[in-house]
Amino acid sequence: MITSVQNSQVKTWAKLKMKKFRVKTDLFLIEGEHLVAEVHDSDWRIEELIIQDGTPIPTFADQYTTTIVTANVFQHIADTKTPQGIAAIVSMREVEWVDVKNALLIDSIQDPGNLGTMIRTADAVGFDAVVIGDNSVDMYNEKVIRSTQGSLFHIAVFQENLDTKIPALQKEGFVVWATSLENAKPYKDVQVTSKTALLVGNEGNGVAQSLIDLSDCSVKIPINGKAESLNVSVAAGILMYHING
C-alpha cells in the first residue's frame, strides 16, 4: 500500500493532470466507478488501477496491475472533491477513420463541459466521428472525460487541423455544414446528404470565418423566444439529431 504523496509513483500519477505530461507519456488518468467500468468494456487499454484502501474492488481488477493507496494519496491524485476511491491510468489510442458517414467538427471550444457533452451527444445520436480542431480544450482533460460519461471510449475522436481536414472531407464526398448567425439558412431548409459533417465553433465567437468560407453551407437554428443564442452543445445536439434523423 502506498501511504505517502511523496512517493515517486504518486508524483507521476499527479503529473497526468498536466497536458504536456499526458502528451509526453501518451497516458491519462480517469477516476470514478462508472468511467473505469466503461473503459474496461472498451478497446482502450488500462495500464493500472488505483484503488483507495477500503473501496470495493471490481471483479475485473485481477486483469490489471492494481495498486492500493491511502485516502490522502487518492485525494492528492483525484480531480473531484469527493472521489469514489477508484481510478485508472489509461493509454491513449489511435483510432481509425473507417466508414464515417456523419462527423462533428469542433472549432476552438474552450469549456471542458461543452466538449465532453458534445462527444457524449454525438455518441448518443449515432454519429461516427468527432474531429477536434486546434485551439480547443484537450480531449483528455479530466473535466472533458467526466462530461463524456464514457462516450470517449465508444466513438472515434480525432484531433486534427480543420483547415486541412475540411477539404479532405469534401474530397471524400462530405457536405460540410458550418453553424453561423450571419448569411445562414435555417437548418431545416438544407438538404441532408449521405455524408454530412457539422462544424460548430467557439462559445463566444462561433466558427472562424476562414472555416466558414471553406464549408459548403452555413446553417442556423431559428430562435423563437428572446434568448440571443443557444449554448453550443445544445445547438450541436439539435443539429446532429436532425442530420441523423
Image (cartoon, rainbow, N blue to C red):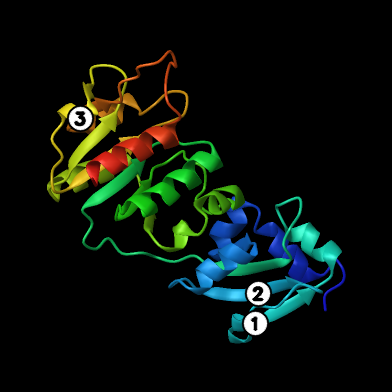
From the top left corner, tell me how far across and down residue 99 is, in percent: 21, 61
Query: Mark 1 = which residue?
Result: 65
Which residue type carries mark 3? Lys
CB contact under 8 Å: marks 2 and 1 = yes
Q: Which mark is residue 188?
A: 3
From the top left corner, tell me how far across and down residue 50 is, in percent: 70, 72
Which one is earlier in the sequence, the residue at label 3 or at label 1?
Answer: 1
Q: Is residue 175 above or below residue 61?
A: above
Quarter assignment of residue 83: bottom right
From the top left corner, tell me how far across and down residue 139 is, in percent: 50, 51
Q: Is residue 191 above or below residue 102?
A: above
Quarter assignment of residue 15: bottom right
From the top left corner, tell me how far across and down residue 79 is, in percent: 70, 53
Q: Secondary structure at mark 2?
A: strand
Q: Is residue 112 above or below residue 48?
A: above
Question: Is 148 positioned to the left or the right of 70 in the image?
Answer: left
Q: Which mark is residue 49?
A: 2
One can see residue 223 in this view: yes
Q: Observer-nearest residue: 15 or 71? A: 71
Which one is earlier in the sequence, the residue at label 2 or at label 1?
Answer: 2
Q: Secondary structure at mark 1?
A: loop
Q: Residue at x 71, y 52 (%)?
A: 80
Cα separation, mark 3 vs mark 2, equals 47 Å
Which residue type carries mark 2? Leu
